[in-house]
Image (spheres, rainbow, N blue to C red):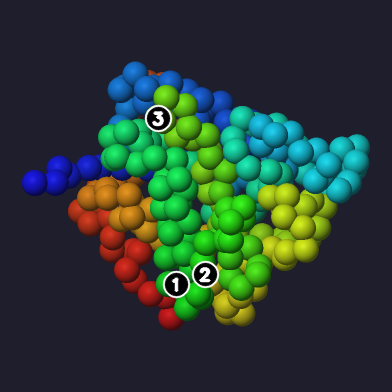
Amino acid sequence: MRSLRSLQVWKLGTVNYLEALKLQEKLVSDRKAHKIPDTLLSLQHPPTYTLGKRRTDHNLLIPTSQLQKIGAELHYTQRGGDITYHGPHQAVLYPIIALRDIGLGARNYVEKLELTMIELASLYGLKACAGQKGETGVWVGDRKIGAIGVRISSGITSHGLAFNIDPDLNYFKHIVPCGIVDKEVTSLRRETGTVLPSDEVVHEQLISCFARLFGFSSIIWKANDSVFSDTEKSEKYVTANASVLCNEKTE
């Protein structure tokens, strides 16, 4: 009989990139030591460009001295993938999960992240799909709506995915997104042409899709005031069925 598995979700709101990175590093260490269960961070960042471990600086199309003028930061990371943008009205998920516990390899893990965003898009009537070879992420036609960049250390994941709800797409003009030339970046708002529910609702739908696809039977929501505290361990509430929101199509 398949065992029931719970996913701990921390809803952080808007968090500075370096602060979120530091938190991920601590949680990865705790997960390796079996101090915490599988955990998912749900958040947004202020305008931020990040580069993966390949250090493809040439895909940043403006001088770093100009970043402050457009209100953006630049950070280097140890994740896979190329340059990308994070900002307001973008749903970011950082899973801190043990792949060996669920029998997944790196490729299967990335494919499930893609499916998570594909299912979310389908709730809004969009036919999204994974990219062609060498084009990791999720696309609507030849327009990219979701990016993926992950790190796996001793079987524990960090970094993750970013789904464009309604970000300022002008920020993408200053980079070659994910190092893929001649391809546009799009958003849920642009593709649907409709008024969307709040970012919080879309975040929760994305979380639910993630939980269902990765086989979690319930979600433990962490209270915001306990997230950055080492001493507070309060839990907000538990949902009995992790698939509810993901199966509700938005009209």
Under mark 1, the amino acid is Ser
- Visible residue check, residue 57: yes
Q: Dot 1: what SS?
A: helix
The residue carrying pointer 1 sits among few (fewer than 14), some (14 to 19) or many (20 or more) residues within 10 Å by Cα, namely some
Under mark 3, the amino acid is Gly
Give me the disc on residue 244. none
Residue carrying label 2: 128
Vertical placement of residue 239 versus 76, above or below = below
Vertical placement of residue 100 versus 46, above or below = above
Vertical placement of residue 229 versus 62, above or below = above
Q: Mark 2 or mark 3, which has the lower sequence index?
A: 2
Q: CA distance from mark 1 to mark 2?
A: 7 Å
Residue carrying label 3: 155
Residue carrying label 1: 122
Q: CA distance from mark 1 to mark 3?
A: 30 Å
Give x and y (percent) for residue 219.
Answer: 29, 47
Q: Mark 1 or mark 2, which has the lower sequence index?
A: 1
Q: CA distance from mark 2 to mark 3?
A: 29 Å
Q: Residue at x 35, y 41 (%)?
A: 104
Q: Is residue 49 left or right of residue 232?
A: right
Q: Dot 3: what SS?
A: loop
Q: Is residue 183 left or right of residue 93?
A: right
Q: Mark 1 or mark 3, which has the lower sequence index?
A: 1
User: Tag count in the figure?
Assistant: 3
The residue carrying pointer 2 sits among few (fewer than 14), some (14 to 19) or many (20 or more) residues within 10 Å by Cα, namely many
Q: Residue at x 87, y 38 (%)?
A: 64
Give x and y (percent) for residue 243.
Answer: 28, 60
Q: Dot 2: what SS?
A: loop
